[in-house]
Image (spheres, grey):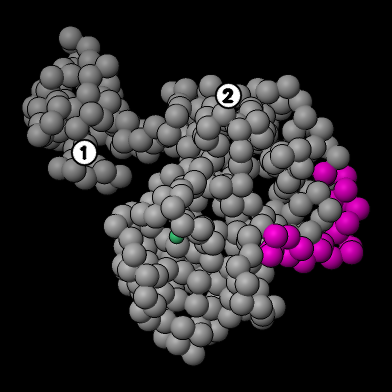
């Protein structure tokens, strides 16, 4: 099999594959599924050529799952686009946390290339972002298990599909989630049937944007020299900062050592503070929604490296967000879906507890029984 070289016209590649230049030009005249001038270098190309009658067929593989086939019948060329099916099975991946979530997932996910494992870790963080701050809640010795769809391309390439269920065991306490269809709406619930979405996020930055996966243990400037009552998230300058929950901006401006700072008061009386910002996108008095971008990570005030300084205050006193948000949970399932949920949960959690690797040769349903 040949591939198209860098800067090479398609006709030249086809000539190398055995077609006459005229034949190649004629065939490409019927091309509509591709632009012959814009076929990428590296595109695989095959041709069937007989010494007597010339070329009868050639293919261009534009993507893993997409082939354009040109065949000659009598004197005319016909183009046909072929979409190759991905197949999906279900695997359990997971392991013990040594230093990173990605590392723990890697233990049972040899099939997924490293970049895909990282994507899977990010996807898991997205599912859990109302329950767990994966950048700092995980410790060495915690464990993770994920039941996930595995998609295979015709050429053997593998990528993760949807997360079906997961269990994170943090300091011995499990945080469980599974995917379920409430009617036609598919979303994630915990083991008790409460929505994974809640009134507050657990971190003001997206997990995928945080540079130091385990968070920063020491203040980047002050080190351990000063008692430090907030949390610091290392992230590059310009990273979007999200409101932890719905609320009203009670301060937006410069605040001494905090530099550019935003403070938001939430419905439960809690105040969140975001410091050292590079930019502020909101004004004092305005209302904000959960996850809304309110500013950008910077290094203003008493700081020399870009990071977000984040605090949670309850009645003016600093609180650990894990403690302050401990009882914040999502809405429970509608009563009419509970039996279907219980049926799916027992089946899916049994699969989640299966030995690591392949558990089913097909995708897992999002619902069993009920209407
Ligand atoms: Zn700080």
Crowdedness of circle 1 by 10 Å Cα count: few (<14), some, many (20+)? some
Residue 300 location in percent, x, y? Answer: 31, 67
Q: Is residue 89 left or right of residue 85?
A: right
Instruction: Give the label, 2 or 1, closer to the camera.
Output: 2
Residue 243 location in percent, x, y? Answer: 52, 70
User: How many angstroms separate mark 2 from mark 1 (CA)?
Assistant: 38 Å
- Looking at the rendered image, the quarter that the C terminus falls into is bottom right
Seen at 13% across and 31% down, the residue is 6
Q: Can residue 231 be seen in this view?
A: yes
Seen at 23% across and 29% down, the residue is 42
Residue 125 location in percent, x, y? Answer: 57, 48
Seen at 82% across and 62% down, the residue is 333
Q: What element carries label 1?
A: loop
Q: In which quarter of the image is ligand 1?
A: bottom left
Crowdedness of circle 2 by 10 Å Cα count: few (<14), some, many (20+)? some
Residue 336 location in percent, x, y? Answer: 89, 63
**19 and 91: which one is in front?**
91
Q: Can residue 74 be seen in this view?
A: no
Circle 1 residue: 39
Seen at 70% across and 41% down, the residue is 170
- Looking at the rendered image, the quarter that the N terminus falls into is top left
Label 2 CB-ligand 1 distance < 8 A: no
Region in magenta: 323-345
Q: What element carries label 2?
A: loop
Q: In this view, does 145 lie to the left or right of 48?
A: right
**366 and 303: which one is in front?**
303
Mark 1 or mark 2, which is nearer the start of the sequence?
1
**183 and 93: which one is in front?**
93
Circle 2 residue: 107
Please check the rendered image and state whether residue 167 is part of the magenta-colored stretch, yes or no.
no
Please check the rendered image and state whether residue 340 is part of the magenta-colored stretch, yes or no.
yes
**371 and 217: which one is in front?**
217
């Amino acid at each position: 099999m040949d591939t198209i070289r860098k800067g090479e016209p398609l006709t030249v590649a086809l000539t190398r594959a055995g077609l006459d230049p005229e034949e190649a030009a004629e065939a490409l005249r019927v091309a509509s599924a591709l632009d012959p001038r814009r076929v990428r270098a590296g595109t695989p190309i095959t041709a069937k050529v007989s010494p007597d009658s010339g070329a009868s067929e050639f293919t261009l593989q534009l993507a893993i799952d997409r082939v354009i086939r040109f065949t000659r019948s009598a004197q005319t060329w016909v183009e046909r686009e072929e979409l190759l099916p991905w197949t999906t099975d279900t695997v359990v991946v997971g392991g013990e946390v040594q230093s990173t979530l990605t590392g723990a997932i890697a233990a049972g996910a040899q099939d997924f290339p490293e970049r895909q494992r990282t994507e899977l870790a990010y996807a898991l963080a997205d599912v859990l972002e109302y329950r767990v701050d994966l950048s700092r809640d995980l410790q060495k010795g915690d464990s993770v298990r994920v039941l996930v769809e595995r998609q295979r391309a015709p050429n053997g390439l593998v990528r993760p599909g949807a997360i079906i269920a997961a269990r994170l065991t943090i300091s011995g306490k499990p945080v469980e989630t599974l995917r379920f269809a409430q009617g036609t709406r598919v979303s994630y619930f915990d083991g008790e049937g409460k929505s994974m979405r809640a009134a507050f996020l657990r971190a003001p930055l997206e997990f995928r944007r945080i540079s130091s996966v385990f968070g920063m243990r020491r203040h980047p400037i002050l080190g351990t020299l000063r008692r430090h009552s907030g949390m610091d998230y290392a992230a590059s300058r310009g990273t979007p900062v999200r409101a932890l929950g719905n609320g009203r901006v009670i301060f937006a401006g410069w605040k001494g050592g905090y530099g550019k700072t935003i403070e938001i008061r939430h419905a439960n009386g809690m105040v969140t503070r975001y410091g050292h910002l590079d930019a502020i996108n909101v004004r004092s008095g305005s209302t904000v929604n959960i996850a809304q971008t309110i500013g950008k990570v910077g290094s203003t005030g008493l700081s020399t490296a870009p990071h977000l300084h984040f605090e949670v205050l309850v009645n003016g006193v600093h609180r650990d967000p894990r403690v302050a948000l401990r009882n914040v949970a999502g809405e429970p399932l509608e009563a009419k879906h509970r039996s279907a949920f219980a049926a799916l949960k027992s089946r899916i959690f049994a699969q989640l507890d299966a030995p690591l690797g392949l558990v089913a040769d097909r995708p897992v349903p999002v619902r069993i029984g009920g209407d």
